[in-house]
Image: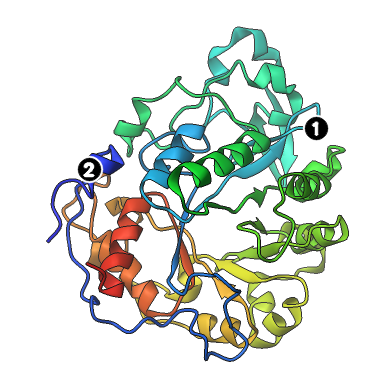
């Protein structure tokens, strides 16, 4: 049983994780060279990859340089910045265009008149929007923990970190790769592309430009680009991006760029559709429930065909999001009744490794790294 910190000396954060993996001797079911249509690129890892979701966002305010750096210290393979754009057209890292929940903008009286209501993918949303701020103005704000009630440790860092630009994170990735002696990957997500285009921006063109500038514009580069909107990924290709891409999906609903046609994610993730989409994308980032759904009582069910169908089309599968707090775990993986306490997160992510996923998005990357270590039987 794990107690105390996971490699606390190295990771710098105390992590109390209960439960142990029961799959220490399991055979790896991911990325095997003999699986049809799923041969790894030269130098590509055969083990499940750990994607630090918005950085080590379980321990530091999300989308900050501190969160990304901590994630790399926890041996995450990739860091994930979400991308929106400033008034002067700079890509910056925020989860949403509206920033009242992730910055201290409401505490700045000089920006009180910027509060407004906009249509965000068909939903009237009130707050402060990145695209109403220049980069210089945005840099006067400070990040804060979005889930303060659940993540009090992270909230102690409120007010300490700036909002980084995507280019700053690209430079950080290169520096950390050099310092650690291992190639750190980056997997940016273009957020609300339809909204940004309606506001007069072209995020895909800017992502493609920076991928070229930082020598990441190839299939072999340690970079993937994600979006919940299929049009964005196609536009990215047309803008000259030659690297890999991931189509993000949910168990319900559909992509906003195709909402007028009534297209659903369920329709886009059939075996036939996956084969057709493989012309444009390299993988899927499904909601966890599309890989292993929950039962009616909230307990974890049995795997679907999602992984097998995607692999048959030559596509990777990297589900989201794994979080250690009871509040986010299946009912049968919780410990105690406090929603902020860590439950059997190691066991949950191991179930997905056993289902054959190629990677996982984690708020607590150290938990997923430890689960992978025991799953692979590494000492």
Q: Closest to the observer: 165 or 157?
A: 165
Q: Is residue 102 above or below residue 370?
A: above
Q: Nearer the viewer, mark 2 or mark 1?
A: 2
Q: Is residue 366 above or below residue 22?
A: above
Q: Is residue 285 above or below residue 202?
A: below
**Which residue does the numbered mark 1 point to in the structure image?**
89
Q: Closest to the observer: 220 or 332?
A: 220
Residue 95 relative to residue 279: left or right: left
Instruction: Give the percent coordinates (x, y) of residue 352.
Output: 39, 73
How packed mark 1 is, by other alpha carbons closer than 10 Å (few <14, some 14-19, many 20 or more), is some
Q: Is residue 97 visible?
A: no
How packed mark 2 is, by other alpha carbons closer than 10 Å (few <14, some 14-19, many 20 or more), is few
Instruction: Give the percent coordinates (x, y) of residue 257.
Output: 78, 58
| Residue at the image position 65 percent from the left and 85 percent from the top | 313
Instruction: Give the percent coordinates (x, y) of residue 189.
Output: 64, 51
- Tell me the colour scheme of the image: rainbow
Q: Quadrant of residue 302?
A: bottom left
Q: CA distance from mark 2 to mark 1?
A: 40 Å
Task: Please tell me whether mark 1 sits on a helix, a strand or a loop.
Answer: loop
Return the disc, 2 or 1, that comes first in the chain's sequence: 2
**Which residue does the numbered mark 2 point to in the structure image?**
8
| Residue at the image position 33 percent from the left and 37 percent from the top | 151
Q: Closest to the observer: 343 or 332?
A: 343
Task: Please tell me whether mark 2 sits on a helix, a strand or a loop.
Answer: helix
């Amino acid at each position: 049983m794990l107690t105390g910190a996971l490699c606390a000396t190295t990771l710098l954060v105390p992590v109390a994780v209960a439960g142990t993996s029961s799959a220490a001797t399991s055979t790896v079911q991911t990325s095997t060279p003999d699986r049809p249509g799923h041969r790894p690129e030269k130098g590509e890892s055969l083990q499940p990859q750990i994607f630090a979701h918005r950085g080590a966002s379980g321990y530091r305010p999300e989308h900050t340089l501190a969160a990304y750096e901590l994630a790399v210290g926890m041996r995450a393979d990739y860091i994930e910045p979400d991308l929106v754009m400033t008034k002067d057209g700079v890509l910056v890292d925020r989860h949403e265009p509206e920033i009242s929940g992730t910055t201290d903008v409401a505490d700045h009286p000089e920006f009180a008149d910027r509060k407004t209501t906009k249509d965000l993918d068909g939903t009237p949303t009130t707050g402060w929007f990145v695209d109403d701020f220049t980069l210089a103005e945005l840099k006067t704000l400070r990040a804060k923990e979005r889930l303060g009630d659940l993540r009090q440790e992270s909230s102690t860092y409120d007010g300490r970190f700036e909002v980084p630009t995507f280019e700053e994170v690209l430079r950080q990735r290169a520096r950390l790769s050099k310092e650690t002696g291992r190639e750190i990957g980056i997997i940016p997500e273009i957020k609300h592309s339809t909204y940004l285009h309606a506001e007069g921006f072209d995020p895909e063109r800017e992502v493609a430009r920076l991928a070229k500038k930082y020598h990441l514009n190839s299939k072999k580069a340690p970079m993937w680009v994600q979006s919940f909107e299929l049009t964005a990924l196609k536009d990215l290709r047309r803008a000259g991006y030659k690297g890999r891409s991931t189509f993000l999906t949910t168990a319900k609903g559909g992509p906003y760029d195709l909402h007028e046609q009534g297209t659903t994610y369920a329709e886009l993730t059939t075996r036939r559709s996956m084969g057709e989409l493989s012309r444009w994308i390299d993988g899927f980032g499904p909601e966890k429930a599309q890989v292993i759904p929950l039962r009616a009582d909230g307990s974890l069910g049995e795997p679907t065909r999602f992984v097998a169908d995607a692999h048959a089309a030559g596509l990777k599968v990297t589900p989201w999001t794994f979080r250690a707090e009871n509040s986010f775990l299946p009912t049968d993986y919780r410990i105690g009744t406090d929603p902020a306490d860590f439950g059997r997160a190691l066991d949950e992510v191991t179930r997905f490794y056993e289902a054959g996923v190629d990677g996982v998005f984690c708020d607590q990357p150290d938990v997923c790294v430890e689960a992978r270590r025991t799953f692979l039987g590494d000492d």
